[in-house]
Image: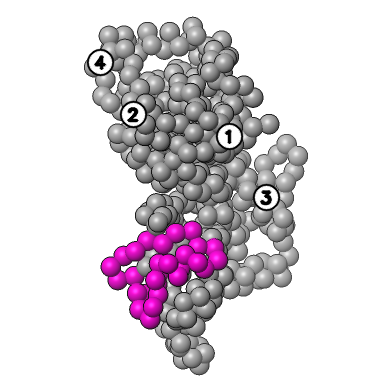
């Protein structure tokens, strides 16, 4: 059964700007999915819809098989949520915040909470208002994971954290995966984190689903072709070639993403354009993201 | 275990793991009967998804390089002397494959490529001898 399922989700904000135009994807139990997209692509909106914080226009969302707007308490008690703009009460101490969460969740794991306090080197007596941005985020993460949620929704959780704190955060999420088999959906601009954590990548672009593929598939069966702008090579022609997912126009060359391994793409491009000198290579997620996001017409 | 992961690489992480474990077995760093770290332990150590580790382990098991025993750590399979030699050669073949691609892409003739390879092998030998003399 799917833990989380978006079906044809639409969402428009009051000012009439469409944020999501029919997004569908599902996340299975124990899966770790990275949610990618440029700023404003609709990632936060999707996560808030899953939390029941926003309603969908057309379409539906189901979490553990139910609508989070219909059974908010039942759903939220099984979810851990961290977002970039989450605000914890500044006048409470770390200890008090932890104790409030402990009371809310019957599944609270004290040893885990203690471990995390130490791992993050957090002073339990410090007031939230006195903590750095990174430390406050770590408190939020601790509260999100120490009840061993079945589903972890992380909205740009590592934004503003230094590399050491980010790694600590990542390791905590991996620990939760290992110990509780949790399902994780997280949005991030840190492609290294996505590459370490995620098995699958969902990319949204201007409110639509652009890619929903396993990371291994993206690396093994996708490539970026660099085509010189000569001999009549054009973005239009490239887009008609089988397997082309997008073309980014640069001053000297065209960069095209193909859903094919380099060996498979080269002959198709050479035949399609009637040119030689096509260079195709497998790329990491960061380059793939830039090419895909910049290559949509 | 000596394993490093480069998440930015175009090579999937599970393949990086497989390649490095294969290399360690071929080089003799990992010997038949040696235990591999558990999926959990390696995932925590490298900071990668445990599914990635188990994917690499499953493929290595399929290839007969490691053995799974119920409730116990994975071990490196026993291998005959012939297997060891085959593994070394397979390892070399994998390393040379990208070079062959470069040779073809640049239009270098087989003779030129072979002569350079011989020359480089010869150069390596020469420097080893130099060290021995000192």
Q: Is residue B82 magenta?
A: no
Host chain of mark 3:
B
User: Can residue A75 be seen from the camera position used here?
Assistant: yes
Q: Residue at x 41, y 55 (%)?
A: A296
Disc 1 is attached to a residue of which chain?
Answer: A
- As measured in the structure, the alpha-carbon distance from the residue carrying label 2 to the one carrying label 4 is 34 Å
Q: Secondary structure at mark 3?
A: helix
Give the percent coordinates (x, y) of residue A17.
Answer: 36, 34
Return the x and y of residue A144 as percentages of the image width and height: 46, 21
Q: Which residue is mark 1?
A: A7
Q: Is residue B8 above or below residue A200?
A: below
Image-quadrant location for residue B79: bottom right
Which mark is in front, 2 or 4?
2
Disc number placed over residue B58 in the picture, else none: 3
Label 2, on which residue?
A15
Q: Position of residue B69 (x, y in %)?
A: 74, 43
The stretch in magenta equals: A226-253
On whether disc 2 and disc 3 are found on a single subunit, the reply is no
Along the line of sight, which residue is nearer the eye, B95 or A22?
Answer: A22
Q: Which mark is residue A129?
A: 4
Circle number at residue A144? none
């Amino acid at each position: 059964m799917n833990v989380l399922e978006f079906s044809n989700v639409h969402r428009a904000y009051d000012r009439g700007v469409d944020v999501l135009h029919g997004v569908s994807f599902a996340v299975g139990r124990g899966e770790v999915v990275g949610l990618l997209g440029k700023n404003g692509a609709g990632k936060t909106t999707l996560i808030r819809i899953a939390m029941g914080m926003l309603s969908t226009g057309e379409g539906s969302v189901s979490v553990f098989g139910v609508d989070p707007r219909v059974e908010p308490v039942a759903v939220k008690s099984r979810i851990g949520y961290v977002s970039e703009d989450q605000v914890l009460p500044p006048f409470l101490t770390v200890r008090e915040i932890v104790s409030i969460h402990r009371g809310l969740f019957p599944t609270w794991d004290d040893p885990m909470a203690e471990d995390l306090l130490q791992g993050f080197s957090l002073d339990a007596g410090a007031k939230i208002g006195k903590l750095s941005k990174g430390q406050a985020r770590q408190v939020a993460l601790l509260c999100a994971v120490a009840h061993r949620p079945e589903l972890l929704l992380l909205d740009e959780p590592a934004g503003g954290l230094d590399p050491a704190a980010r790694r600590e955060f990542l390791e905590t999420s991996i620990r939760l995966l290992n110990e509780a088999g949790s399902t994780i959906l997280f949005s991030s601009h840190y492609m290294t984190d996505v590459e370490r954590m995620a098995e699958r990548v969902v990319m949204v672009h201007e409110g639509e689903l652009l890619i929903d593929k396993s990371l291994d598939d993206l690396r093994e069966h996708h490539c970026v072709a660099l085509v010189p702008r000569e001999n009549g090579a054009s973005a239009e022609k490239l887009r008609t070639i089988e397997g082309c997912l997008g073309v980014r126009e640069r001053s000297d060359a065209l960069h095209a993403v193909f859903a094919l391994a380099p060996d498979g793409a080269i002959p198709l491009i050479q035949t399609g354009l009637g040119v030689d000198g096509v260079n195709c290579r497998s790329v990491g997620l960061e380059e793939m993201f830039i090419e895909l996001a910049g290559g949509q017409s | 275990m000596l394993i490093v992961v480069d998440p930015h690489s175009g090579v999937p992480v599970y393949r990086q793991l497989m390649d490095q474990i294969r290399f360690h077995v071929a080089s003799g760093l990992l010997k038949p009967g040696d235990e591999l770290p558990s999926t959990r332990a390696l995932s925590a150590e490298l900071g990668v998804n445990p599914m990635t580790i188990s994917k690499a382990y499953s493929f290595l098991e399929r290839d007969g390089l490691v053995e799974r025993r119920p409730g116990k750590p994975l071990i490196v399979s026993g291998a005959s002397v012939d297997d060891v030699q085959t593994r070394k050669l397979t390892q070399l073949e994998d390393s040379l494959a990208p070079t062959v691609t470069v040779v073809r892409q640049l239009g270098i003739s087989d003779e030129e490529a072979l002569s350079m390879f011989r020359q480089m092998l010869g150069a390596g030998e020469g420097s080893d001898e130099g060290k021995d003399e000192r």
